[in-house]
Structure formats: structure tokens, C-alpha cells
Image (cartoon, coloured by chain):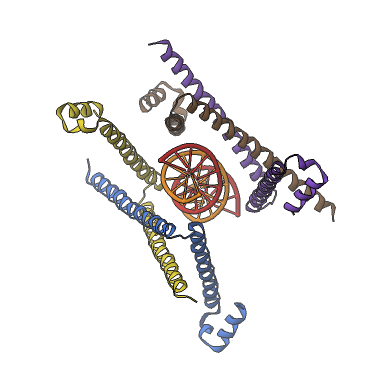
Chain colours: A blue, B yellow, C purple, D brown, E orange, F red
Amino acid sequence: MTDVGNNSAAQLRSIIERIERLEEEKTNIALDIKEIYSEAKYNGYDVKALRKIVADRKKDRDDLAEFEAIVDTYKRALGMLSDTPLGEAAIQKATA
Amino acid sequence: MTDVGNNSAAQLRSIIERIERLEEEKTNIALDIKEIYSEAKYNGYDVKALRKIVADRKKDRDDLAEFEAIVDTYKRALGMLSDTPLGEAAIQKATA
Amino acid sequence: MTDVGNNSAAQLRSIIERIERLEEEKTNIALDIKEIYSEAKYNGYDVKALRKIVADRKKDRDDLAEFEAIVDTYKRALGMLSDTPLGEAAIQKATA
Amino acid sequence: MTDVGNNSAAQLRSIIERIERLEEEKTNIALDIKEIYSEAKYNGYDVKALRKIVADRKKDRDDLAEFEAIVDTYKRALGMLSDTPLGEAAIQKATA
DNA sequence: CACTGGAAAATGCCGC
DNA sequence: GCGGCATTTTCCAGTG
């Protein structure tokens, strides 16, 4: 086997193991989340409602992020004007 | 608003925030995984094949876990025999 | 092998095969449904909206079925009165 | 209302009704399957075990399909060699 | 009658 | 940008 081959094998192993390590962490976190929902349920909360709240709040955040991305795009399009009163006005008009 | 109400609101807030914190961690880990795949792709690896390797290895682990669960069931079925030479022999035969 | 054993094996085989045959039919129908959605999408329909319509109509049907079950319960509770004007009036009042 | 509107409405109705018809068939088949499990349970079979058998057999079929897909890929990769003795030998070796 | 486990549906992601 | 695929979420029946 060549050195290249060895390196490739070692590199491949490294890739796979890093991924598996992270997948495991992800799974554990998912379990933690489930546990919180379970506790909440035990404490009388409606889990479905909780999930909806979390989802809605996430959607709000995503919408906000999208909005800010648009604002950034406008800012970039406006270039150096963005930090002048005129640029500000343009942005405010565009994002009203 | 009553104290109970305050407590409930605080408790609810705590639940939601803990979940959202964990969801964020989970998302970040997912991003890390994606990044590893991206790097691998950049280094000439076939991402689909890598995913298959990871999935197959996971499948192997799951199969092993299932097998061990069956073994545990057998062990339980054998009950107190399990700590006797006879029980040991039976288990070893069953799990060979 | 005993006759009982044979019968059992044959019976088991029959059970499994009948289930698998039905599962296959079910899968084929699911594929047909997917195809209709695909065609609809190709024709410019919003698949997500279509799915919602189907779900809502199903819910309506279920609600109607539930309603009719309640009516039946009332009718049964009212016994022979159910086919008299008085019974009708009672049912109408109860289901208003 | 325009003719186009009418056509669209009719088309939409057609789509929805075809889907609902198929959904109903699917539900009926699911009920048939449940009935078979119920009968089996009544006859002393372990339903959970039956489900596992069905699932495992399906898994086997899926694995075989996947394997054959890989073989097809190899065959395609071997291209025109496949109808020569050398190509045949290679394929047979690869799929042994 | 609430809970768990399993089927079905929906969503998001990836490559083409 | 779309279809296929994998994951996630929802739904529901069986069970204690």
C-alpha cells in the first residue's frame, strides 16, 4: 500500500469518525429535548401546543432573518450611501 | 396576575428557552456535519458514498443493539440460571 | 413434523402473504396518489394547498360522522320517540 | 365566471375527487390488514412478531433491490464489455 | 384514559 | 427549480 493510500484511508477514517461523533451529539441533544417535553407533559403542559409555540417562534426568527437579509442586500446595493441620511431614508422607504 | 400565574409563566418561559437553546445546538451540529461533508467533497470524496458508509455503520450498530436486546430477553427468560455454569453454557450456545 | 405444525406453518404463511399482498396494493395506491399530485403540480396547482383541501374535507367528513354518531346516540336514548314529532323536536333541540 | 374559471373549477374538483377516491381505497385496505392481524391475534399469534416478520421480509426485498441496482450500475460501467466473455467473467466475479 | 410504539404525512435537503 | 430522499413530526391504535 502506498503512502497516499495510507493517508487516504486515515483521512477517510477521520472524516467518518468526526461525522459519527457529531451525529451522536446531535442524537443526544434530541433526546434531551424529548426529555424536556416529557417533563413538561408531566407538569401538565400540552406538548403539542408547546411544539407549536417553538415552531412559531422559530418562524418569526426566520422571517426576521430573511427581512434583515433583504435589508443587507439593499444596503449593499446602496453602497456607501448606507451610512448617510439619504441612504437611511432610501432603506427606510424600501423596507417600509 | 397571581403568583401561580407568574410561576407558570416563568416555568413556561424556562421550558421554551431550554428547548430553543438545545434546538440551536442541534442545528449548529448539523451545520458542522454539513461542513465536514463539504470539505470531503472538496477533497474529492463522493459525498453520497460517505453518507452510505455512515448509514451502514449506524445500521450495523442498530442491528447489534437489537441483537443484544434479544439476548437480554433470553437472559431474563433464563432468569436465575444465568449465574450458574449451566445457564452460562445455555446463553453462550444461544448467542454463539 | 406434526400435522398441527404443518397447519400452523401453512396458516402463518397464509397470514403473511395476505398481509404482504394488501401492503403492496396499498403502496401502489399511494403511488397513484403521488402521481395525481405530480400532475396537478405540473398543471400549476400548489400541492401543499391541495393537500390542505383534502385534509380539511376529510376533517369535515369526520366531524359530520361524529355529529351523526351523536345524533344516533340521542335517537337511541330517545328510543321509540325518535320517529314521532315529539322525538324529532327533542332531537332538533339537542342538535341545534 | 369565465369558462376558464369553470374549467379550472372542474379540473380542481376532478383532482380532489380522484385523490379522495384513492385515499378511501387506501384506508379500506389498511382496515383489511388490521383485520388480518386481529384474526391472527385471536388465533394465538403474536401480532408484534408478525409485524416484525413482515417488516424484515420487506427489508430483505429492499436490500435485494438495492443490491440489484448496484449490479446494474456496475454493468452499465462495464458498458459494452458486458456481452463479451471477459465482461461476463468480471460481472460474475463482482456479483458473486 | 393516558402512554408508548408504530404507521403516515409533511417538511427540508440534496443532487441533477 | 424540481424530483427524490431522509429526517422529522403528527396521528392513531393497542395496552396497562
Which of the image's four quarters has the C terminus of chain C?
bottom right
Question: Where A4 sits versus A26, above or below?
Answer: above
Residue A61 in percent (x, y) is at: 50, 68
Nearer the observer, D86 or B71: B71
Indicate the quadrant where residue A29 lies: bottom left
Look at the picture and state if D55 lies above or below D43: below
Quarter holding residue B49 = top left
Using residue D30 as the reference point, say whether residue C75 is left or right of it: right
The residue lying at 24 percent from left, 32 percent from top is B79
Q: Is residue B6 left or right of residue D10?
A: left
Residue B71 appears in the figure: yes
Q: What is the x, y in percent for residue B25? A: 37, 62
Q: Quick check: A6 above or below A38?
A: above
Q: Quick one: D63 or A82, which is closer to the camera?
A: D63
Compare residues B10 and B66 and report the one nearer the observer.
B10
Residue appearing at x 48%, y 57% in the figure: A47
What count of labels does the image hold? 0
The location of residue A2, given as percent across then percent down, is 22, 43
A1 relative to C53 in the view: left or right = left
x and y percentages locating residue D72 in the rendered image:
46, 31
Residue D72 showing in the rendered view: no
Residue B83 or residue C14, whichever sits in front: B83
The quadrant of the picture occupied by the N terminus of chain C is: top left
